[in-house]
Image (spheres, helix red, strand yellow):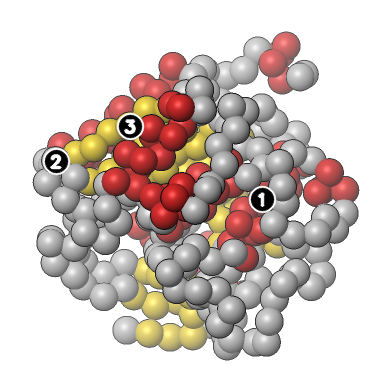
Amino acid sequence: MQFTSTFSLVRCICFACPVVGADSPVVVEIWPGKVPDEIDDIGAETLRMSLELDRIQVEVTESTTMVTNVTLPIITIYRPVKENDTRTAMLICPGGGYWNLYWELEGEEVARWLNSLGMTGIILKYRVPRRPDEPKSQPARRPLADAQRAVSLIRSRSEEWGIDKQRIGMVGFSAGGHLAIATATSFEQRAYEPIDDVDKVSCRPNFAVAVYPGYLKDELARGMKIASTTPPIFLAHGGEDIVSDPEHSVSMYLALKRAGVGAELHIYASATHDFGVRISDHPYSAWTESCVKWLRHQGLLQPPTRQSQSR
């Protein structure tokens, strides 16, 4: 099943199947005017179903909704109900190998989970697929610019959106997990030329969660820098992942520890790829519980004090 749509149609579909939260989600374009470093038109934005796969490759084998041909990056903001609001937010980076975005499994379902914890879930629709000048063997470069800009935009409008600017994190899956790590480790250097006052606001996330991320082992081998000021990071991976080897998370964990950065790692034996936040009988399903404990230990699931809000 496949059909094409304009940005407006995709936005309408997102509104038609809302994540349970306080209000209808808010959709915001992250770039003013022309999107930087964009090339010729790649065709209309497309919403389609993923292929059905087997358990050797992924945990969620049935088809789920994907988005591709993204040329206009946006964020979609899902707020929790007011009485549960912790004023903590997470920018959600769906995976898809930098070719597609697994919008349902690693986007909307994640926003619903975050809302249940009293957190604002903000899905980043970053540019995919890879453009012709982005090598297949390496992470695409344009999504990092989109992610950095999104973090700065969220922080610049945090008061308007009921978010504590000191509680803006990221969560990413597969390629999106790499994107979350890349944003958390490259905040001192923008991947684009600053455009306006939003780019004067820090693009450093306060924490990050990466679930079955890819590319990290090779990135570290190529000299990826991890500063001691990198925010705390939580990593989860399947031990039998053939799509993204668990060594990516293991290598990153060790590198973070060498840099003196707080990190936590969970590897789940016999688990493969693409399990998102879905509940199952498999032990990997416990990663969300472990993550919640980690977030709580970081002090992110309690409403902030007035003093912390004023910093």
Q: Quadrant of residue 243?
A: bottom left
Q: Measuring from the top left, give residue 91's x and y in whole percent.
A: 55, 46
In the image, what residue occupies the spot 87% across and 54% down? 196
Position of residue 199 relative to residue 262, above or below, is: below
Which quadrant, please, contains the N terminus?
bottom left
Q: Which residue corresponds to mark 2?
A: 269
* Distance Cα–Cα, label 2 vs label 3: 13 Å
Q: Which residue corresponds to mark 3?
A: 265
Q: Which residue corresponds to mark 1?
A: 148
Q: Say if mark 2 contacts mark 1, CB within 8 Å.
A: no
Q: Measuring from the top left, give residue 107's x and y in whole percent.
A: 44, 55
Q: Nearer the viewer, residue 233 or 82?
A: 233
In the image, what residue occupies the spot 37% across and 69% down? 65
Going by the numbered disc 1, the residue's amino acid type is: Gln
Going by the numbered disc 2, the residue's amino acid type is: Ala
Which quadrant, please, contains the C terminus?
top right
* Distance Cα–Cα, label 3 vs label 1: 24 Å
Q: Measuring from the top left, give residue 56's x and y in whole percent.
A: 12, 62
In the image, what residue occupies the spot 43% across and 69% down? 137
Secondary structure beneath dot 1 equals: helix
* Distance Cα–Cα, label 2 vs label 1: 33 Å
Q: Nearer the viewer, residue 139 or 291?
A: 139
Q: Nearer the viewer, residue 200 or 78?
A: 200
Would you call the spot at circle 2 few (<14 residues within 10 Å), some (14-19), or many (20 or more)? Answer: some
Going by the numbered disc 3, the residue's amino acid type is: Leu
Of the image marks 3 and 1, the number of the one nearer the N terminus? 1
